[in-house]
Image (cartoon, grey):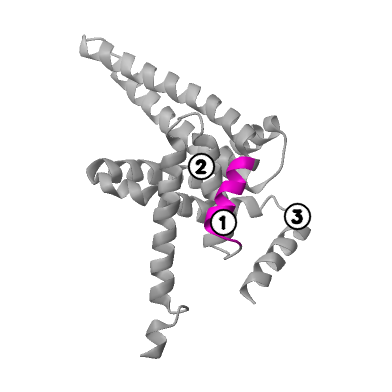
């Protein structure tokens, strides 16, 4: 019976992670209200999930705001570029759909622009996660993120599927918006960390493993 109330019990750990996911999702939603801060908010979520939830290093609240402040400039600039691309794809898709309704053969183009919309959204996942994990110039960050998205196309397509499913889940059951953002980011973390580690040096990997071990022991 005593083990049931042990804070190391798997049940308590699971409940704790669920609470953390809800907290992170709410922080993300709150920080996204100005719209221009979506990039910084998304970067902070990935950083916090990777450091706090997955590896138990630091505290959720303080680490989130630390990542938000530190990466604000680069993440916001990246988001403005992503937002512009998303707007173009959405407008083009809607325009082609309207033309199709008048009898013109543009329906397929509407679908193409819609797919491109989600691909840009997935590329944004690479960009903000990359910013959260590495220090690099802005141009190199965009270049490396695009390179990874293309080279690891199967994983990118999986991320695309997850993005669509997440959007549909919130659309069908709106209250899920209180947890879906963080859950989606956790799934991205599982995928992207596999990819990122391929581009990290042996020394960087050893140092990171040592930092994680220090918090577990």
- Residues 127 and 47: in front is 47
Disc 3 target residue: 201
**Mark 3 and mark 2: span between their CA atoms?**
26 Å
Circle 3 crowding by C-alpha within 10 Å: few under 14, some 14–19, many from 20: few
Q: Which quadrant is home to the C terminus?
A: bottom right
Q: Which residues are magenta?
A: 58-69
The residue drawn where x is 38% and y is 75% is 11
Q: Is residue 212 magenta?
A: no
Left or right of residue 83, residue 77 in this image: right
**Mark 1 and mark 2: span between their CA atoms?**
12 Å
The residue drawn where x is 62% and y is 73% is 216
Numbered disc 1: secondary structure: helix
Quick one: label 1 or label 3, which is nearer the N terminus?
1
Q: Which mark is residue 42?
A: 2
Measured along the vertical axis of the image, is residue 12 above or below residue 92? below
Measured along the vertical axis of the image, is residue 217 above or below residue 158? below
């Amino acid at each position: 019976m005593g083990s049931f109330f042990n804070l190391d019990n798997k049940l308590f750990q699971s409940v704790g992670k669920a609470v953390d996911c809800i907290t992170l999702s709410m922080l993300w939603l709150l920080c996204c209200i100005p719209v221009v801060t979506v990039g910084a908010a998304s970067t902070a979520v990935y950083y916090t999930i990777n450091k706090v939830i997955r590896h138990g290093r630091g505290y959720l609240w303080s680490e989130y705001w630390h990542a938000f402040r530190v990466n604000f400039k680069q993440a916001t600039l990246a988001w403005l570029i992503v937002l512009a691309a998303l707007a173009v794809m959405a407008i083009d898709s809607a325009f082609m759909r309207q033309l199709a309704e008048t009898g013109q053969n543009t329906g397929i183009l509407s679908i193409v622009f819609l797919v491109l919309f989600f691909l840009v959204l997935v590329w944004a996942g690479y960009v903000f996660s990359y910013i959260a994990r590495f220090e690099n110039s802005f141009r190199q960050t965009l270049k490396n993120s695009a390179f990874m998205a293309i080279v690891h196309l199967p994983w990118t397509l999986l991320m695309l599927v997850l993005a669509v499913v997440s959007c549909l889940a919130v659309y069908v059951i709106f209250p899920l918006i209180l947890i879906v953002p963080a859950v989606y980011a956790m799934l991205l973390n599982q995928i992207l960390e596999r990819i990122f580690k391929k581009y990290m040096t042996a020394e960087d990997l050893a140092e990171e493993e040592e930092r994680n071990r220090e918090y577990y022991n």
